[in-house]
């Protein structure tokens, strides 16, 4: 069935929109919708979507962008701290799993070298699916997520010799050359060195200049260039493109531009990842699955069980908890795109019997199709296997119960938990006032809740949400959004529910001050005017004006709603006050994995090494301790909450993780 390219794209987009929407409505992962679209429209079913070199490249770029964004959250010190897990645990999982399947192959009279390649192909797990799903489930920083990530990184490296061995078999049974393998490894090391050096010494000054140009499209182009250039360098050395992009992301994680870079790359990543999942769905031969249902079901069950057992056994040597080991094994039990690539090479070259490779290929793809269901239920599966009953309350349940308890008492409602909202929250805490914050950014909410802040996902203009966070018992409401239109909508919702609560609104200027007051704002605080007032008060003090007169002057200006400061001429190209970004303090939660330098040491020792941040809290076993003492001894798995400028936070993270 031949379909014009434009028609093919339109059908693909329409099907993706419909199916993914239905999946979301049913509470299923979006990945499952993309895989279903690929299965139905692929060459083995309707045949509308035909994969080509171009679509395969674009799909692979989706994985590249995913690993790049993960690199932005994974600093070089953290890589050093987890090197034991990456190379030790990762190599153990690959050798155990590939060895087990190679032994099974030999028992079925498969040649030894071919059995090793088949075992290596099965040992691979899907980096894209696992990391995407665990990120959506907020489990990537949990113990099982961290261990799985370490194994996946080593699998990316192990793919190089496996691919070389598979290519040798495909060329007609040539012997695997040790010299070729060594040269491939040396080339990979050089590529990693090039990406690391470029990221360390070139990227920061490059993005500094581009950021000061204030051209958004130039910033986007620079981000795309860096991602693709690092992937290309890695690809030239025989490594996966995703590995090079991950290293580049790690280098950029140490700059102050990482948040903007992530927001720029996210649309490209999500679209191309969708294409990747669709392309995986097209690989499933539904006809063969139907004809050889019992055989493929047996192969699939064997694949999942053996991979789970080998991975759990490998993790158990590094992790004391049997439950966490089994849970990590469940995550790593699915097949991967690297395994599909190796089996496809063997199948197309005729180096292996199709009767063996074809069912194995379908079973791997089917495991990837089922992976969203497996990954989303990794905890119940692990509990079922161990015949354990989980605790009645999870960390998330405890956090929700704590927020509900605050909502019933006198508290402050913060609408928006960006930089301004977080600064207000810190001051409220120091003065002993409780608060609940509302925000719609899942990444920010996840980080805040990890640090122990009572932040709830919800629209501040939704009356039901306002009721649930205790507007009826709130002593004040603070709206921190800069957009006046958003603030007006929130004000109207608040006033419909409660007319007497004080509501303070932040704005950038006075352009809609009257509208905000009319909508019900008790006080409106324009940022630019407050900055001017602070400057005026400092100038008057320096001019020896009595403090009482300074306070009276500032108070009169405020009482007249800043009328004295409104008669100024604005420029269309006016720049922000803080052009140098001197005031960039922020909070960050740093998880201490096994092997971190700070484990077993006190905060005083960390500070003695030059840490110039404030340690605002330590979260241990779900319990948050605010303002820890200098003599507090840090433990494995602690979440250390620090506050400071990006460079200081970067240095503190390097000290905590790598010393």
Image (spheres, rainbow, N blue to C red):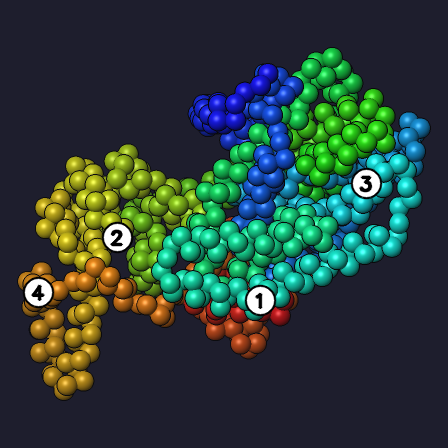
Q: Which of marks 3 and 2 is nearer the N terminus?
A: 3
Q: Quadrant of residue 226?
A: bottom right
Cβ–Cβ below 8 Å for labels 4 and 1?
A: no
Q: Earlier in the sequence, mark 4 or mark 2?
A: 2
Residue 472 percent location from the top left of the image: 23, 41
Q: In this view, does 275 lie above or below 140?
A: above
Question: SS class of the residue under badge 2?
Answer: loop
Cβ–Cβ below 8 Å for labels 2 and 1?
A: no
Residue at left 35%, top 46%? 439
Circle 2 is placed at which residue position? 482
Circle 4 is placed at which residue position? 567
User: Which is in the foreground here, disc 1 or disc 3?
Assistant: 3
Circle 1 is placed at which residue position? 200
Residue at left 12%, top 71%? 554
- For residue 305, the mark is none
**From mark 4 to mark 3, how far is it between C-alphas?**
75 Å
User: Which is in the foreground here, disc 3 or disc 2?
Assistant: 3
Callout 1: 10 Å neighbours few (<14), some, many (20+)?
A: some
**From mark 3 to mark 2, how far is it between C-alphas?**
57 Å
**From mark 4 to mark 2, how far is it between C-alphas?**
22 Å
Q: Which of 328 and 106 is in front in this view?
A: 106
Q: In this view, does 389 lie to the left or right of 29?
A: right
Question: SS class of the residue under badge 3?
Answer: helix
Residue 416 percent location from the top left of the image: 31, 49
Name the outermost residue toward the bottom: 544
Q: In which quarter of the image is residue 249?
A: bottom right
Where is the C terminus found, in terms of image quarters?
Answer: bottom right
Circle 3 is placed at which residue position? 167
How many labels, in total?
A: 4
Q: Which of 358 and 437 is in front in this view?
A: 358
**From mark 4 to mark 1, how far is it between C-alphas?**
48 Å
Question: SS class of the residue under badge 4?
Answer: loop
């Amino acid at each position: 069935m031949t379909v014009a390219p434009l028609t093919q794209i339109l059908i693909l987009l329409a099907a993706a929109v419909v199916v993914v929407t239905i999946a979301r409505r049913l509470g299923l992962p979006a990945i499952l919708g993309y895989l279903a679209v690929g299965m139905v429209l692929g060459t083995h079913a309707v045949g509308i979507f035909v994969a080509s070199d171009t679509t395969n490249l674009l799909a692979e770029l989706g994985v590249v962008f995913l690993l790049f964004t993960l690199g932005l959250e994974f600093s070089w010190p953290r890589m050093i701290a987890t090197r034991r897990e990456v190379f030790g645990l990762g190599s153990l999982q690959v050798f155990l799993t590939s060895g087990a399947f190679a032994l099974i192959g030999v028992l079925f009279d498969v040649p030894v070298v071919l059995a090793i390649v088949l075992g290596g192909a099965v040992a691979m797990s899907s980096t894209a699916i696992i990391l995407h799903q665990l990120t959506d489930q907020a489990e990537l920083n949990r113990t099982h997520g961290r261990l799985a990530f370490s194994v996946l990184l080593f699998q990316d490296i192990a793919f190089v010799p496996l691919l070389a061995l598979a290519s040798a078999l495909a060329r007609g049974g040539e012997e695997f050359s040790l010299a070729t393998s060594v040269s491939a490894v040396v080339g990979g090391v050089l590529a990693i060195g090039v990406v690391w050096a470029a990221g360390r010494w070139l990227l920061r000054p490059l993005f500094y200049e581009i950021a000061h140009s204030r051209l958004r499209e130039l910033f986007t182009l620079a981000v795309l260039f860096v991602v693709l250039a690092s992937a290309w360098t890695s690809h030239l050395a025989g490594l996966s493109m995703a590995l090079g992009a991950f290293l580049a992301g790690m280098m950029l994680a140490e700059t102050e531009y990482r948040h903007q870079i992530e927001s720029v790359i996210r649309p490209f990543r999500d679209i191309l990842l969708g294409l990747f999942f669709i392309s995986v769905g097209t690989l499933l031969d539904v006809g063969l699955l139907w004809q050889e249902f019992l055989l493929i079901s047996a192969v699939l069950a064997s694949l999942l069980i053996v991979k789970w057992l080998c991975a759990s056994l490998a993790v158990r040597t590094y992790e004391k908890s049997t439950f966490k080991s089994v849970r990590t094994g469940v995550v790593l039990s699915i097949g991967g795109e690297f395994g599909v690539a190796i089996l496809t090479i063997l199948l197309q070259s005729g180096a292996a019997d199709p009767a063996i490779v074809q069912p194995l290929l379908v079973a791997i793809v089917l495991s990837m199709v089922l992976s969203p269901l497996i990954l989303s239920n990794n905890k119940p599966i692990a509990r079922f296997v161990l015949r354990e009953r989980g605790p009645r309350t999870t960390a998330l349940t405890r956090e929700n119960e704590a927020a509900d308890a605050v909502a019933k008492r006198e508290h402050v409602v913060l609408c928006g938990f960006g930089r301004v909202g977080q600064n207000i929250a810190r001051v409220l805490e120091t003065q002993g006032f409780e608060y609940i914050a509302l925000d719609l950014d899942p990444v920010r909410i996840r980080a805040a809740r990890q640090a122990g802040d009572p932040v709830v996902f919800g629209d501040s203009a939704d009356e039901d949400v306002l009721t649930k966070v205790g507007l009826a018992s709130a002593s004040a409401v603070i709206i921190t959004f800069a957009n006046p239109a958003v603030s007006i909508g929130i004000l109207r919702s608040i006033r419909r529910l409660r007319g007497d609560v004080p509501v303070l609104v932040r704005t950038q200027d006075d352009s809609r001050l009257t509208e905000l007051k009319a909508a019900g704002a008790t006080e409106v605080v324009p940022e630019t005017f407050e900055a001017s007032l602070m400057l005026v008060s400092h100038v008057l003090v320096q001019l020896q004006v009595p403090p009482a007169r300074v306070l009276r002057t500032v108070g009169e200006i405020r009482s007249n709603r800043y009328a004295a400061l409104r008669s100024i001429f604005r420029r269309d190209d006016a720049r922000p006050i803080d052009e140098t970004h001197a005031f960039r303090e922020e909070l960050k939660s740093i998880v201490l994995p096994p092997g971190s330098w700070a484990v077993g040491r006190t905060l005083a020792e960390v500070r003695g090494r030059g840490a110039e941040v404030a340690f605002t809290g330590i979260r241990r076993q779900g319990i948050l301790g605010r303002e820890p003492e200098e003599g507090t001894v840090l433990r494995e798995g602690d979440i250390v909450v620090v506050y400071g400028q990006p460079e200081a936070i970067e240095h503190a993270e390097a000290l905590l993780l790598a010393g």
